């Protein structure tokens, strides 16, 4: 990190890892339910049922990428999978918490209007149940809705330009950048400030959770505190306000 002439600006070295292509925020949830002729009064993603949220994720992916696949950065887009979906939602990557999320999924499925479960979804859920295993004691389980709130309150889901599913602050917008910065142990989302007088400045939007090869490589380099030995990544300085 380097000081600048203004106390309001922090100049930090790091790497661009991804671009936000689409976000799934509370407005997207409300639009989704209205399109089905339903009224949804939830105030955040964490109040949406898992089956409905998964249905929305696939709808947004299809609407955004189906017609654009050939013109995006990667010739082969990532596809949403339940493993990635739960990997984003489950805090601490815990098998016990994954079990709790899966238990909630099946409980909510009985009351969901998302329609019958596809064979592909059923197969993915079966595999995840094997990964999660059974908890040693039912008394160790906590209300998974607390975990949902912990993961999703004030957050939104995102798709990168390569089709990867992630999680970021609810104020994120398409076009925002996902970056890895020296001194931080997690990805963040930043937004370019408009106007030539801003001198390539960026606004800090918030933390981000996105698991793809570019993000892993960038985070590995900043964690080591050195330069990219493979030479595939080019660092730059970001002036954050």
Image (cartoon, helix red, strand yellow):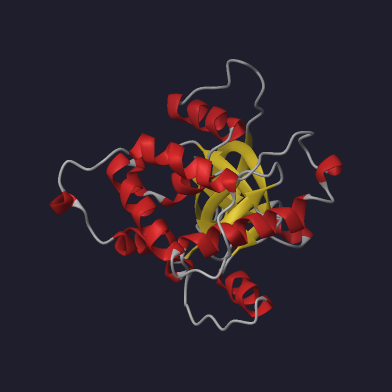
38 relative to 55, above or below: below
Which image quadrant is residue 196 in? bottom right
Q: Residue furthest top?
A: 229
20 relative to 230, above or below: below
Q: On the picture, is 132 further left or further right than 56?
A: left
Whether residue 210 is visible, yes or no, is no
For this rendering, which residue is in front, 187 or 40? 40
29 relative to 200, above or below: below
Place of residue 170 in the rendered image (x, y in percent of width and height, measured from the top left):
53, 65
Residue located 52% across and 55% down the image: 168
Whether residue 33 is visible, yes or no, is yes
Place of residue 236 in the rendered image (x, y in percent of width and height, measured from the top left):
64, 36
Residue located 60% across and 54% down the image: 158
For this rendering, which residue is in front, 43 or 126? 126
Place of residue 4 in the rendered image (x, y in percent of width and height, measured from the top left):
55, 48
Place of residue 61 in the rendered image (x, y in percent of width and height, measured from the top left):
69, 53
45 relative to 12, above or below: below
Residue located 50% across and 60% down the image: 51
Residue located 37% across and 35% down the image: 131
Q: On the picture, is 105 further left or further right than 147?
A: right
On-image quarter of the C terminus: bottom right
Count of numbered circles on the image: 0
For this rendering, which residue is in front, 149 or 231? 149
């Amino acid at each position: 990190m380097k000081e600048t002439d203004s106390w309001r600006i922090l100049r930090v070295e790091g790497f661009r890892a991804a671009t936000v292509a689409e976000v799934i925020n509370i407005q997207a949830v409300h639009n989704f339910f209205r399109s089905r002729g339903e009224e949804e009064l939830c105030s955040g993603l964490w109040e949406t049922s898992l089956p409905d949220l998964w249905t929305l994720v696939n709808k947004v992916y299809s609407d955004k990428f189906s017609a654009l696949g050939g013109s995006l950065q990667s010739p082969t887009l990532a596809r949403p999978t339940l493993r990635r979906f739960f990997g984003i939602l489950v805090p601490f990557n815990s098998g016990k918490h994954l079990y709790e999320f899966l238990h909630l999924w099946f409980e909510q499925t009985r009351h969901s209007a998302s329609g019958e479960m596809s064979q592909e979804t059923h197969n993915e859920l079966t595999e995840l149940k094997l990964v999660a295993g059974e908890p040693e004691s039912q008394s160790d389980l906590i209300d998974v809705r607390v975990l949902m709130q912990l993961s999703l309150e004030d957050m939104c889901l995102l798709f990168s330009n390569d089709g990867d599913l992630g999680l970021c602050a609810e104020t994120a917008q398409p076009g925002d950048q996902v970056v890895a910065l020296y001194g931080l142990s997690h990805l963040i989302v930043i937004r370019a400030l408009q106007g030539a007088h801003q001198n390539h400045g960026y606004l800090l939007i918030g933390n981000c959770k996105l698991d793809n090869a570019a993000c892993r490589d960038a985070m590995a380099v900043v964690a080591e505190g050195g330069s990219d030995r493979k030479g595939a990544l080019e660092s730059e300085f970001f002036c954050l306000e």
